[in-house]
Image (cartoon, rainbow, N blue to C red):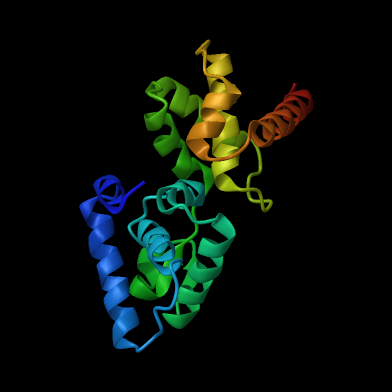
Amino acid sequence: MNKEEVYKIINEKIKEETLLMVCKKIINNLSFYNSTYPPAIVYLAYKKIKNPMPISFISQLFEIEVKYILKTYKKIKKQLNMKQCKISSTFGMKCVQIFTPKQYVENIAKKLNLSNNIMNTAISYLEKIETGNGRNPTIVAGASIYLACLFCNNQKTQREIAYVTGCTETAIRSNVKLFIKKITLDENKNG
């Protein structure tokens, strides 16, 4: 993928946020020494504008492995004195929002052309289970969407959902199994 194609995909708001961070980086005389900085800064910009984007998507755009982007992302956050927080607006530029699976559901549902009914069903599944146990929020959101599709008789395969979320079918499948266990246990306790 060439630079023009990448720029077409990245919207204007991301370009502005990215430019702002690059300017701060240059102003602070921080070294711009490798090719992992642009994708890491784009990933950070997506987080700053409260529009979660899977790191795997950015990895594919820039054709750089996820582990290198994340390493540079952490380095940039440290250099800019940014912290992780639940509400981004609390600390302004010094804060990067932590996203929950619910926030990924809408993006994934749009990419799969799913109805609001399926999206709301997926969110209700997320509310029924605990998702804050260190699991990847993109995968958890994908698994809840898969369950919602099954429940609403929408024919989406694990492969389609895995492709959109940037994870493996196995990851979706294992999370679906955990969801089903958790939901049936809750129903047995309540019923």
The picture places residue 135, in percent across and down from the top left corner, at 65, 48
Q: How many marks?
A: 0
- Along the line of sight, the residue nearer the viewer: 120 or 176: 176
Q: Is residue 124 visible?
A: no
Q: Is residue 28 visible?
A: yes
Residue extending farthest top = 153
The picture places residue 100, in percent across and down from the top left corner, at 52, 49
Quarter of the rendering containing residue 29: bottom left
- Along the line of sight, the residue nearer the viewer: 180 or 46: 46
Quarter of the rendering containing residue 143: top right
* Residue that appears at 54% across and 22% down: 148
- Is 115 placed left or right of 142 in the picture? left
The picture places residue 23, in percent across and down from the top left corner, at 27, 77
Residue extending farthest front = 2
* Residue that appears at 53% across and 10% down: 153
Q: Work out which quarter of the rendered image holds the C terminus and state it.
A: top right
* Residue that appears at 41% across and 22% down: 114
The picture places residue 9, in percent across and down from the top left corner, at 29, 45
Q: Is residue 73 above or below residue 164?
A: below
* Residue that appears at 32% across and 57% down: 49
- Is 80 placed left or right of 126 in the picture? left
Quarter of the rendering containing residue 32: bottom left
Q: Is residue 19 above or below residue 98?
A: below
- Is 102 placed left or right of 132 in the picture? left
